[in-house]
Amino acid sequence: MAENPQLKALFDGSVPPWVHRFAKQTGRGINEHKMITDGDAVIVGVSGGKDSLAMALALSLRRQWLPIKYEPEAVMIEWKEYPLSTEYREKLETFFRTIRMPLTILTYRMQPESFGGRFNCYLCARNRRRILFDYAAEKGIRKIAFGHHLDDLVETSLMNLFHRGNLDPMKPVSPFFDGKIEVIRPLCLVKESAVRRLAQAFDFPILEIDCPYKEINLRKDVKEIVRMMTKIDPLTREHIYNAYFSKGNCHAKD
C-alpha cells in the first residue's frame, strides 16, 4: 500500500507550523512531567483511535529535533472477537512505516474467562492495560505511553469527583508495581480538538469497532458538561488541569 505523501513529507522536513505546534505542545507535557529521558525505550499503546495515532506521530516526529534519543515501539492489541481486516492491517502497517516507528500487533480475547461473564468499559481497559504491562515486563521496558489528551484527564477527574466522591485525577505520569512500570500520557496538555484536526488532515487509519457499550459510556455525558462549561469560560479545561497539576505536581497522591 502506498504511503500518504502528506504524512511522508513531515519526515522529509516539510512540517506546517500548526503541526510543529502540536508536536511542541506534546513535548512540553513530556518535559514538564519528565516522562522521557535519553536512552528510554517506550511502548506506545495503540488502540487504532485518533488519540493514540496522533501521539505516535508526535513522539516519532519530535525525535528529529531533540538532542536526546529514545526508542518508541507501537503495540496494538487485536481482540479475537473483533479481528482486524486485511485492508485495515495494511493501512495501519503503512502508517507506522511512514512515521518510522516499529509496530507489533498482539492478539487476545477481549473477554477472558477470568471475567466470569462480567464485562464493561472499565474491565476492557483493565484487560488491555494488563496485556501491555505483561509485554513490557517481558521486554524489560519500564515506560508505556497512552494517548489520553487534556480532555481525557479533565473528564476522568470529574468522573471520579462526581461518581466516586474523590479528588483522584488521571495523572500525566502514573507508576505501577513500585515504579517497575510507568504509564505516561504525552498528550496531557493537548486538547482533543487539536488531535481531531491532525487526524483529519493526514487521513489517519482510524479503527472503528462496533462495541455494544459505546453508546452508554459515562464519559460521553461528562464530555457534554465540560463542553457547556467552556461556553462560559474557554479555559475551563486548563483551569481544572492546573487545579490538580500546577507546578508539575503529577506524582501527588500516588
Image (spheres, rainbow, N blue to C red):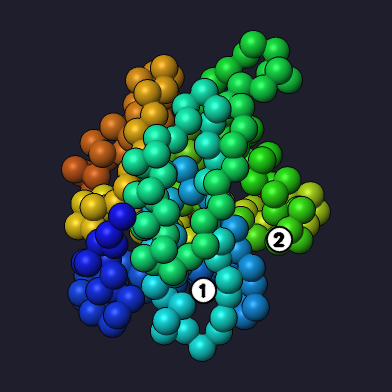
Tell me the quarter of the picture where residue 141 sits.
Answer: bottom right
Q: Position of residue 174 (x, y in %)?
A: 64, 53
Give the amino acid at mark 2: Arg
Asked which quadrant contains residue 231, the reply is: top left
Give the residue pinned by disc 1. 31
Using residue 43 as the reference point, say whether residue 209 is left or right of it: left
Q: Which residue is nearer to you in this view: 160 or 48? A: 48
Disc nearest the viewer among 2 and 1: 2
Residue at point 65% right, 78% down? Answer: 39
- Mark 2–mark 1 Cα distance, whole angstroms, equals 17 Å
Relative to 196, 76 lies left or right? right
Q: Residue 143: percent from the left, percent from the top?
A: 65, 60
Instruction: Name the quarter where the N terminus is drawn.
Output: bottom left
The mark nearer the N terminus, 2 or 1, is: 1
Q: Which residue sits furthest right?
A: 178
Q: Residue furthest top?
A: 117
Vertical position of residue 47 compared to residue 109: above or below: below
What label does residue 12 carry, if any?
Answer: none
- How many discs mark residues in the rendered view? 2
Q: Secondary structure at mark 1?
A: helix
For mark 2, does the 10 Å Cα neighbourhood hold few (<14), some (14 to 19), or many (20 or more) residues? Answer: some
Q: Position of residue 248 (x, y in %)?
A: 54, 66
Residue 101, visible in the rendered structure = yes
Numbered badge on residue 142: 2
Q: Secondary structure at mark 2?
A: loop
Kind of residue indicated by mark 1: Asn
